Image (cartoon, helix red, strand yellow):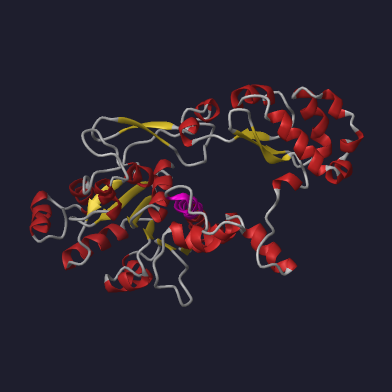
Amino acid sequence: MSGVRVLEVAAWTYVPSAGAVLAEWGADVLKVEHPETGDPQRALITSGLVPSGPGGVNHMIELPNRGKRSVAINLSTEEGHEVLMGLAAKSDVFLTNWLPPARKRLHIEVEDIRAVNPDIIYVRGSGQGQRGPEKDRGGYDGCSFWGRVVADMVTPADREWPISQPAPAFGDLLGGQIIAGGIAAALFHRERTGEALVVDNSLLATAMWAAGASIMATGLFGLTRMPQMDRTLAPNPLVNNYRTSDGRFLSLIMLQAGRYWADLVTKIGHPELATDPRFSDDKAIYENRAEGVKLLDSIFATRTFEEWREVLMGIEGQWAPVETTAELIEDPQALANGYVREIIAASGTTFRCVPAPLQFNEAPPDLTRAPDLGEHTDAVLEELLGYDMDAIIDLKVKGAIL
């Protein structure tokens, strides 16, 4: 993405995370923030949700804003709007999650931006989409992604309350990656055809895509919701979770039961089950599934999580340890592949961050910190718009920029 400039008028995590991915891929991403408040997510440090104090790292700013340049502009002023339009004229992509009424009020709709740059790719991220009765309503991933689509799918039928989203920005980061891919496709299209596209994504669309198999199945079979599996009667005992002696869990996902049964039971110390007629092929395993689950439950309960991890490394089938986030950040497999990278914060503190889930030429990315509010305002206006210091000071006095 070197040579591509992205003008981002967005806040929180969902759409800004798309800008972070593009910055990671080499784009020059200009993050436009209000001179006084900045991205509202910066203020979360006062809520106790992120570390504060000397050397504290606001990870909810760093994660979706690393590698960008911050330009603090008051878009409600005539002078600030003029600065934004000047930057739009110099950009390849305009990226926003502002709602339609705000975009209209501040004159940053498609036609406004295209008036100064007909070739710009205009990109919108929203809660529920750009059409329909909810187009003007905001959304966060906790409601538009998780609450609306995922919560019912994952909540056991006997549970009184739906399960909450398991992690901050869970749906946001998935949606941001999708937007980044859409921008890459739009840039390729423009290069091939000369046509600049409008690109749209929403948290609702992202969730429905993630849940697509279940949504389609309920429609085809006339169900209200997908039936939830009783793990003791799993159709395939090798697609299940098993508890170890120290209360940890292992996830087996061996879809071809007949292929993997003999290898698994032999290597976990029960070769007699490899020739047991109850488990001779897929059909037999299905017919005796309850007994198969019961046997595996008793076997896996005999050793610790770490002991089983060592044993299972030698099997042919697919499995994974159920890890904590603290374990993941130290996971040797993740570290070997560069799935955790180090960044130096503005304070000098070194912290670890998860990069975008793509690599090019097998090279893990080198990440740089998120900018401070308005850190690059003067430099960007000088570099891209040719403003001298007198003009910049005049804009500061008028409250148009920081």
Residue at 38%, 56% in the rendered image: 92
224 falls in the magenta region: no
Q: Locate residue 229, reporting x and y percent.
A: 70, 52
From this view, report whether residue 88 is shown above or below residue 53.
below
From this view, report whether residue 111 is shown above or below residue 193.
below
Whether residue 194 appears in this view of the structure is no
Left or right relative to 372: residue 317? right
Residue at 84%, 41% in the rendered image: 285
Per the rendered image, the range of residues in magenta is 169-181
Residue at 31%, 66% in the rendered image: 116
Left or right relative to 215: residue 18? left
Q: Locate residue 378, reporting x and y percent.
A: 18, 48
Q: Locate residue 294, reporting x and y percent.
A: 76, 37
Residue at 83%, 30% in the rendered image: 262
Whether residue 370 appears in this view of the structure is yes
Residue at the bottom extreme of this rendering: 133
From this view, report whether residue 257 is shown above or below residue 204.
above
Quadrant for the N terminus, please: top left
Residue 267: name its quadrant.
top right
Viewer-proximal residue among 168 and 125: 168
